[in-house]
Amino acid sequence: MPGRLILVRHGQSHGNVARRLDTRPPGAELTDIGRQQAREFARSRPAPPGLLLHSVAHRAAQTAAEIGQEWSRPAIEVEGIHEVQAGDLEDRDDDDAIALFNAVYRRWHHGELDVAMPGGETGAQVLDRYLPVVA
């Protein structure tokens, strides 16, 4: 069945506010601003989706719940689509950790999928768990 896949990043979380690499589920919850962002996203769409899925992260579930409430659609949790695991950088908020995280991401975007987050996943491992769910 043809259709469109729309990926929505979660609303603002307490981890975002703290500028902390918070990737390990269940993770931080949404702030009030994050909840409002999710509702505003739902209101901005011309029509609700046929299916509303979210990862195991609290912030993703809360974002989907807010969107689902606006659209009167259930939000369904699925395994495998949680964000990239920061590994040894988890819970760090320093400039060096964030720069290293971003550097690995840039390498992935340039095709170097065998590069891993320090103590974490490679780009190939992320795709191996993510693509079967969204394909």
Image: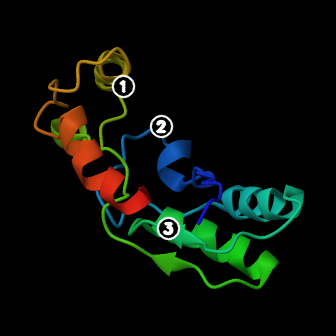
Foreground: 9 or 51? Answer: 51
Q: Write down the residue under mark 2.
A: 19
Residue 134, percent from left and from top: 43, 57
Of tags 1 and 2, the one toward the viewer is 1
Q: Confirm or deny contact between disc 1 and disc 3 (CB under 8 A).
A: no
Q: Write down the residue under mark 1.
A: 98
Q: Residues within 10 Å of mark 3 (few under 14, many from 20)?
A: many
Q: Secondary structure at mark 1?
A: helix
Residue 59, percent from left and from top: 51, 63
The kind of residue tagged 3 is: His
Q: Confirm or deny contact between disc 1 and disc 2 (CB under 8 A).
A: yes
Mark identifier at residue 48: none
**Could you give the CA–CA distance between mark 1 and mark 2, rounded to whole angstroms?**
9 Å
Relative to residue 109, is residue 3 depicted above or below?
A: below
Foreground: 27 or 17? Answer: 27
Instruction: Indicate left or right for 123 with 99 as reference.
Output: left
> Earlier along the polypeptide chain: callout 1 or callout 2?
2
Q: Write down the residue under mark 3.
A: 54
The single residue placed furthest to the left in the displayed view is 119
Rendered residue at 31%/61% (across/down): 80
**Is any part of residue 121 visible from this angle?**
yes
Residue 9, percent from left and from top: 58, 50
The kind of residue tagged 1 is: Ile
